[in-house]
Amino acid sequence: MKHNEELYDVIVVGLGASGLFALANIDKSKRALGIEAKRKVGLKLGITGGGRCNITNVKNLKNYADNYTHPSFVRPIINAFNPNKTMEYFESRGFHLMKEGDRILPKTENAKDVIKFFLNQIKDKGHQIHLEEEIIDFKVADDYVIVNSKASSYQCKKIIIATGGATYHNTGSNGKLVKKCFDISPYQPALSSMHINEDYFKTLHGVSLNVKIKYDKKTFEDNLLFAGTMLTGYSVMNLSNYIKPGESFIIDFAPHINREDVKTKVKEAIKSTPKRLFKTVCIDILSLPESFVKVLIDKLDLDTTKLADLKSKDLNKFIELLKNMALSVKSKLPLEKAICSLGGVKTSDIDNKTMALKADSRICVIGEALEPVGACGGYNLQFAWSTAFVCIFEH
């Protein structure tokens, strides 16, 4: 092993979203080094948002931290560098953004431009980057931190761990360093599609709805996509951050219409067109895909039922299935196939005013290497920017 005698002020381990932000914002008067295990930086950042990169999300800024697990830990971090400050940060440096719904994206709609933006800042600061060098451990000495790769050993006054979580292993996020050097919360798949135990929807593939899911005290209202007994879409992936296999959730497949309106419209149809099929009327009044409505109709054996023959109890059963169906989770995707991982360095061990270990302020942890995970659509990148900001400017 080659021993590097140079003493760095800061070494950033991992050059994904949070690591790039951190290294780009270390003062140029500091001697700083970024070390990345892969041959390119920002591999996972480059594929976020389908390659378009959800820089942040501006929905409901007042209760923003509620979009994350461990909200009390996350709240002051987001408050220190919120989505508005994130947008100002990029725009004031000549990197222009666009708004699409609540999501904020690069105006070029290209995640690789975000990577270039940070690399230009790092170059301007004169900081070094080492590629294809995996850090295997680090140790604290009396006056500095010793950082070891397979080939070299470095010394620094402060180390920032930005190695990501334990998903998308081909991008460099594997959790090995964090598991070796910290007492962690076990990694679990997050922002994951999920298999359900019920087989009601096994014939549905590629059918999409806007739904409202309730679990514990949380509500997730967004799109859902059927893939047989697997459910995906933002509502399901956000739910996966909290629910465990074996647990149940309640789903409203038609949040756009309340129970009484469904009942009223059906009763009106019974009076005006009693010979029509119940399923045909449901398709009309609900504005939902025919194949989905047919699943509910078939479950109640009402496929050939005319309105004149519809019993009140069967209408109530249909509305209950539509608005209050209970489903149970069989499994999530394997960890390496989930979008993010829940788990990592415990929030209880980190000072959220500095991102440093409570036990040793020379060691900082940022981004997905930490325990919390956020919702889909820019929240996890916002957490990356915010933790890096706090680490650099508040520490």
Image (cartoon, rainbow, N blue to C red):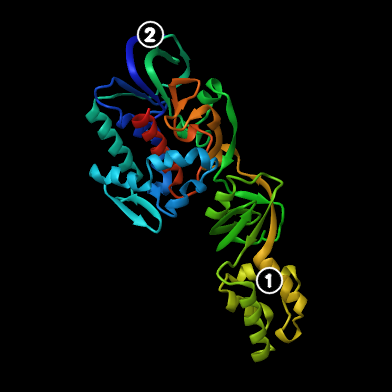
Q: Which quadrant of the view contains residue 37?
A: top left
Picture residue at 53% right of the left edge, 20% below the top: 181
Q: Is residue 32 left or right of residue 387?
A: left
Report whether residue 345 is seen.
no
Numbered mark located on residue 319 in the image: 1
Picture residue at 76% right of the left edge, 72% below the top: 301
Residue type, label 1: Ile
The one nearer the camera, 19 or 37, is: 19
Image x and y of residue 141, in percent: 44, 10
Which quadrant of the rendered structure holds the C terminus?
top left
Picture residue at 64% right of the left edge, 70% below the top: 293
Disc 1 versus disc 2: distance between alpha carbons?
70 Å
From the image, state whether disc 1 or disc 2 is nearer to you: 1
Numbered mark located on residue 3 in the image: 2
Image x and y of residue 393, in percent: 34, 31
Sequence-first disc among 1 and 2: 2
Q: SS of the residue at dot 1?
A: helix
The one nearer the camera, 357 or 290, is: 357
Image x and y of residue 358, in percent: 49, 24
Residue type, label 2: His
Q: SS of the residue at dot 2?
A: strand
